[in-house]
Amino acid sequence: MGACGKSAQFPLHVWLPDAMEGPTPVSALIHAATMVTAGVYLVVRCTPLYAASPYAQEVVSALGGFTALLAALIALTQTDLKRILAYSTVSQLGFMFLALGTGSQLGVTAGMFHLFTHAFFKALLFLGAGSVMHAMGGVIDLCQFGGLRRKMPTTHWTFLFGCLALSGIIPFAGFWSKDAILAAVAEKASEAQGSIFGYLYYVATFTAFLTAFYTFRAYFLTFHGAERIPKEAGHHAHESPAAMTGPLVILAIGALAVGAYFQWTGDFLGRKDYPGFLMQTPSLTALQAENVAEGAEHGPSHLAVALISTVAALAGIGLAWLFYIARRDLAESVAKLAKSLGLYALSHGKFFIDEIYMVMIVRPLEALAALLALADRYAIDGLVNAFGAFPRALGAMLRPLQGGLVQYYALVMALGVLALLGTLLW
Amino acid sequence: MKTLLLVTLFLPAAATILPAVGRMQARCWALLASLATLAGAIVLVAGFPIGAENFAGTDWHWFAAMDKSLDIQFRVGLDGLSLWLFALTALLLVVAVLVSWESIKDQESLYYRFLLLLGTGMLGVFVARDIILFYLFFEFTLVPLFFLIGIWGSEQRRYAAIKFFLFTLAGSVLTLLGLLTIVLWVFNDGGKLTFSIPALRDYLQAHPMPSVMQVWLFLALFAGFAIKVPLFPLHTWLPLAHVEAPAAGSILLAGVLLKIGTYGFLRFSLPMLPNAAAVCMPWMLWLSVAGILYGALVALAQSDLKRLIAYSSVSHLGFCMLGIFALNRVALQGGALQMINHGLSTGGLFALVGMLYERYHTRRIADFGGIAREVPALAFFMLFMTLASIGLPGLNGFVGEFLLLMGMFQRAWGSVATEWTAQYRVISVLAVSGVVLGAWYMLSLVARVFFGPLRERKHTEPIADLSLREVAALVPLCLVIVWIGVQPKFFLDRMAPSIDQLTGQAMRAADTKEEPTQRRKMEILREP
């Protein structure tokens, strides 16, 4: 649960898109690369703990896979560029959890490797979005700008690199890590026939397709098509200064090269270097032992997995190109169909999870709080005040005895004397 | 050292013996006296040997000097438990004086005299080692605070002062009754009439009272201490007293006077009535966790800044009581440390609220908004105190909360399973959710008051940010907060031996009494 909260997995993922209100460099740092990875890191550190319970591992993977799919479905219809990236982060973190839950050496290292490469290309994408936002005078809504590739060439090309990396196209970084994840899930699926991992493999591949689609949807809508500049941009609408584009270029080189570098120094999808480096961690060495015993290759060959994922990614890109460049009218009619089925609203409204939380958790607690506040003021305090009122009431009852009327005192005295005489005589 | 303790204790009271002076002199004298007191306290802390039971102590016969058989003595001394409370009191006294510097505008010399008298009273409570002396100081603190609230408070000050005074007094009269009964029982049983707290404790730990008697006396002591803590549902005096008190009054009330209640439990109820503590443990834990959640929820619904923080005090002291009555070594240390932590962070919060009131003349949250733009330094300190209050790791609140929750979890999951264990587990989980609620209302308070759009105000005089004096009042608190957060060992080392000694028997009683069933416990209570 703690890892879910930190790494924005369902059901605790709602904070991440809302955090996009913050400054973009902050998002690039913590929401892409550092803070959200804390949850993934926690799970990896506790690998021996999770290895002790296959059920827990299934939960982790299922949660990751579900979140990945959920976030991808939401990202399909978002119009705020940063929100798309936020949901894409949630989705990719879901992939990482999916990999970690397999509990195999390949899975755990794939998850960490994806974390590593994701940092590069996601930070790149966020900073690119920030560059666009800066140029557009603070506007980040896709509907309001377009065709920026001539106005902002550096941003355009680096953003494209990031998109290709995110979609998992060879030779970009994302390909190697996402592919390793899919291979790990496939391996686990074939090991544990009939378990949830079989389904998760298909979910993951479908989500990879969706990832490519929504990423390139964002790319095409921003950088291609007719050039549109919102009025807020004013004279800002030009390429960003070197201070902003410099890091973009550096990260783009990283997004391109990092994955390949770590993989080509070993076998094709081999286990040298980065994974080998990770394996030196004491808590992970147990994984090594079990993999060496079982042999290197089993299940669907890694080449097959790589091919399938590449096909899925290319299909996503192709569909995005079809909808947003070639035949916009097709996109319109699909959207209309989706709207009539209510699917569009579901996706655009983030599956209304925020609203559900509000209704189920926040408002009832606030109501309870108000109720208790009233109870405190009137019931409990009323009881205390009643204690305080008691002596006063008693005094009010007894006060007439001190009326000040002399005749009354005389009467009481006489009666008292009579009573005294009476008790003495009897 | 002996004289230093006496001097530090009575210095504030001595400083009140001055001719009626004007405002400037009154303030300066008060500041000097409180700084000197703080210096004395720091020297005592520095010189405190770990494990000492009666450091810098003094024993004077003052009642019945001829007839030494009536063993009422002027007996003061520091031990691990009192040490940090003593130092906290001295520090908060300085803060209180600094915070009142500009805001008190009439009868200043009288105000500062009352403040200093209150200082001596509070210091005395923590170092008294004689029952009569303890009770004397215990009640003595009520008088200056009554006047402070009643004269220099807000609109409903008279009602608040009277209610606070009578409510607390009513409880503490029962406590006196309980304490005297303890003395007389020991006299009856052992033949020696002594009012000395250590002597009574040693005797009662060697020859415990029958459990029935213990429970009755526990209830009697409970009456006074629980009202002071304040434990749900006897807490209703607190929001009123806090809201109506002047800033310094609130600081001392929240920072120190609430701790007198928990201190009473640790000093009297647990050491002298260990079996009763063990028997009453489930009820006390339920009341504590009810206080935690209730305080947090009601705080959420408040629209008055001071009232919100007052209810947060109820919630935090619920945590302290949870730690104390988990009767587990770790939890007790957490609870005792949390007493100090709460004094620091809530004292700081009330100081800041006082500063806000001086500038904006309102306590309604709705009147604020986005003022971090106008008073950034104040916003920083407020956020700092908020984070300390909700238990951010690295600051003091985390250490205390973590220890006491861990101790409670040990009680619920780690010890022998009894019929209460399921309840303890529920209590532990509820207590942890209290932490989340705490974060909720405090952070949303800060968000509503300091961030967001700047609210238009009618008067547009420029609002000054914190002055040097105000920063000087807050910085020492922040430093100690961070110190406790990163090196709690320094504080826990000095507290631990005393707490172990005081509560050892109660802990053992709790652990062994865990075995008997509910039926057996009712039998114990029904024993003649």
Image (cartoon, coloured by chain):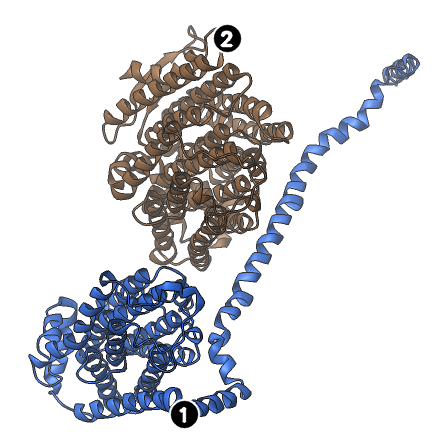
Chain colours: A blue, B brown
Residue A38: percent from the left, percent from the top?
27, 64
Kind of element beneath mark 1: loop
Q: Identify the residue shown where x is 18% and y is 75%.
A: A109
Q: Is residue B289 left or right of residue A424?
A: left
As drawn, B236 above or below B516: above
In the image, A334 versus A395, the foreground residue is A334
Residue B273 in the image, given as x and y percentages of width and height: 44, 36
The total number of labels drawn is 2
Q: Residue B132's x, y, as percent?
A: 46, 20
Foreground pick, A311 / B485 = A311
Which residue position is annotated with label 1?
A327
User: What is the chain letter for disc 1?
Assistant: A
Give neighbour class at mark 1: few <14, some 14-19, many 20+ (Cα, 10 Å). Answer: few
How packed mark 2 is, by other alpha carbons closer than 10 Å (few <14, some 14-19, many 20 or more), is some
* Mark 2 secondary-structure assignment: loop
Tell me: B112 left or right of B344: right
Q: Is residue A293 visible?
A: yes
Kindly identify the amino acid type of the residue bearing the numbered disc 2.
Answer: Ala
Q: In the rendered image, which quarter is residue B478 located in?
A: top left
Contact? badges 2 and 1 (CB < 8 Å): no
Q: Amino acid at mark 1?
A: Arg
Q: Residue under circle 2?
A: B20
Locate the N terminus of chain B by quadrant: top left
Are marks 2 and 1 in one subunit?
Answer: no
Q: Nearer the viewer, mark 2 or mark 1?
A: 1
